[in-house]
Image: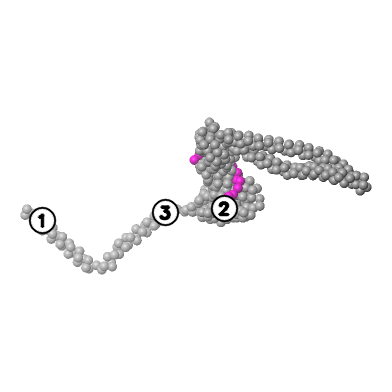
């Protein structure tokens, strides 16, 4: 223990000696001179590194290029295609109303909701007994009047013949009267004979006048009989009409919508009987924007100023697709425009007519076009102009198109888009046929960089 303590004190004395020696030496050397050795050493190392390093490699900079899909523009006739939606309704509906009263004595066995009834089929019959009796009575009255007219014709003929005879008698009587008057004047005959001849002559004149009066009233009697005949014919026609109205007949091929009466039920005049829809034609009303409808008709004028509107409508074709099953389609035609615009959308209500909506029906693979179906309409108009058309995706920022120029370099050009339809942009200006349009969205799009067509483009 004692030896260790002596060693530690000796070590401490040596350390203190060296520290005092270094401090004395540092006090003797200037501060600036103490920095020179490290600086000289650093400079020497830098010179050695520079002299022994290899020179930098030379880098050759290449032009920027991009691979893109291209199309070549073409000018082609443009047909306006407009889409719309609407509900199907029957082109014609039938609401049978009783025009006569009576009990239902017969009902067609197929007269049920949803069944199809062909044109000319009797579906209901009202008891015709009262109307058959009315027809019989009118026929009897007409026969009586015809007999009266025949009797009048006979009476007129007989009276005419009697009048001729009486007129001959009158001539003889007047001749005899003149002879007797002459004899009386000469004193050969008496005054009594003259008076007697005058009375006889007056009686004959009276007979002639009565016969003439009888013939004079014949025209009025005939007119009365003719009027009665006309009235009776009217009654007969009304009775026959009422009798015909006892049979309720389908006016066209139809599908029953509702039946309001049963057999043996009494119906009054004006009571609804049957309602049905025509299966021969169907209609859809689609709301089309005004601007699109003008292009659809092939013009930009006032819709109400078209003198040949019907001809323009006939040039528009229509395809109807079932929204719930687009594979089911029908062909239609634009037939008319309703009288007023839609008050909210300010659109044109165009009516499309579909002929034979039940053609090819094969449920459930193909169902008929029935009322209240929600369908999509694709209207295609005639060619209205020849324009350059490009994919809508090729137009950037609304009016900018990327082109591959003659030297294969990127060009940026602004175009004027007339309208867009079915993923295509129809241009009014900015591109000419034969130019190469880039379909891809280049990022970044640096004008002048090389555009390499994608594989298969050239």
Which residue is at the front of the view, 284 or 175?
175
Between the C-alphas of marks 2 and 3, the distance is: 88 Å
Q: Is residue 249 visible?
A: no
Q: Circle 2 sits on which residue?
A: 340
**Secondary structure category for the residue under label 1:** helix
Query: Mark 3 and 1 residues: CB-CB less than 8 Å, in contact?
Result: no
Q: Residue at x 59, y 49 (%)?
A: 337
Residue 198 screen position, x and y as percent: 84, 45
Category of crowding for the residue at label 3, using alpha-carbon neighbours closer than 10 angstroms: few (below 14), some (14–19), many (at least 20): few
Category of crowding for the residue at label 1, using alpha-carbon neighbours closer than 10 angstroms: few (below 14), some (14–19), many (at least 20): few
Q: Quadrant of the C terminus?
A: top right
Q: Is residue 13 magenta?
A: no
154 left or right of 121 in image: right
Which residue is at the front of the view, 303 or 297?
303
Q: Circle 3 sits on which residue?
A: 54
Give the mark nearest the N terminus, 3 or 1: 1
Position above or below: 163 against 41: above
Which stretch did the figure color magenta?
324-338
Q: Is residue 8 visible?
A: yes
Query: Residue 253 appears in which quarter of the rendering?
Result: top right
């Amino acid at each position: 223990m004692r030896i260790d303590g002596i060693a530690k004190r000796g070590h401490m004395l040596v350390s203190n000696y060296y520290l005092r020696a270094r401090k004395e030496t540092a006090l003797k050397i200037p501060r600036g001179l103490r920095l020179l050795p490290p600086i000289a050493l650093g400079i020497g190392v830098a010179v050695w590194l520079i002299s022994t390093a290899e020179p930098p490699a030379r880098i050759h900079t290449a032009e920027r290029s991009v691979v893109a899909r291209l199309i070549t523009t073409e000018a082609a006739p443009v047909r306006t295609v407009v889409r719309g939606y609407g509900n199907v309704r029957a082109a014609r509906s039938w609401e049978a109303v009783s025009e006569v009263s009576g009990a239902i004595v017969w009902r067609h066995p197929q007269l049920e909701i949803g069944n199809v009834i062909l044109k000319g089929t009797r579906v209901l019959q009202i008891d015709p007994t009262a109307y058959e009796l009315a027809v019989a009575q009118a026929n009897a009255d007409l026969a009586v009047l015809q007999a009266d007219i025949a009797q009048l014709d006979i009476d007129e003929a007989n009276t005419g013949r009697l009048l001729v005879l009486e007129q001959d008698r009158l001539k003889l009587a007047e001749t005899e009267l003149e002879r007797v008057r002459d004899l009386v004047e000469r004193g050969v005959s008496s005054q009594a004979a003259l008076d007697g001849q005058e009375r006889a002559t007056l009686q004959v004149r009276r007979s002639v006048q009565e016969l003439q009066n009888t013939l004079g009233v014949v025209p009025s009697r005939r007119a009365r009989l003719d009027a009665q005949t006309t009235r009776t014919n009217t009654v007969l026609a009304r009775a026959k009409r009422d009798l015909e109205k006892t049979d309720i007949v389908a006016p066209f091929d139809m599908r029953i919508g509702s039946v309001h009466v049963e057999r043996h039920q009494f119906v009054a005049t004006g009571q609804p009987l049957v309602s049905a829809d025509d299966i021969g034609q169907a209609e859809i009303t689609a709301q089309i924007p005004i601007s699109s409808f003008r292009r659809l008709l092939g013009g930009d004028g006032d819709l109400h100023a078209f003198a040949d509107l019907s001809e323009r409508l006939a040039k528009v074709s229509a395809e109807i697709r079932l929204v719930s099953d687009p594979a089911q389609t029908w062909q239609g035609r634009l037939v008319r425009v309703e009288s007023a615009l839609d008050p909210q959308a300010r659109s044109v209500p165009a009516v499309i007519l579909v002929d034979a909506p039940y053609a090819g029906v094969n449920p459930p693979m193909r169902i008929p076009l029935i009322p209240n179906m929600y369908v999509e309409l694709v209207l295609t108009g005639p060619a209205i102009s020849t324009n350059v058309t490009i994919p809508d995706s090729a137009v950037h920022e609304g009016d900018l198109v990327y082109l591959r120029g003659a030297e294969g370099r990127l060009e940026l050009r602004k175009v004027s888009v007339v309208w867009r339809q079915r993923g295509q942009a129809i241009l009014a200006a900015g591109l000419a046929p034969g130019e190469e349009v880039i379909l891809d969205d280049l990022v970044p799009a640096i004008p002048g960089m090389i555009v390499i067509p994608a594989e298969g483009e050239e």
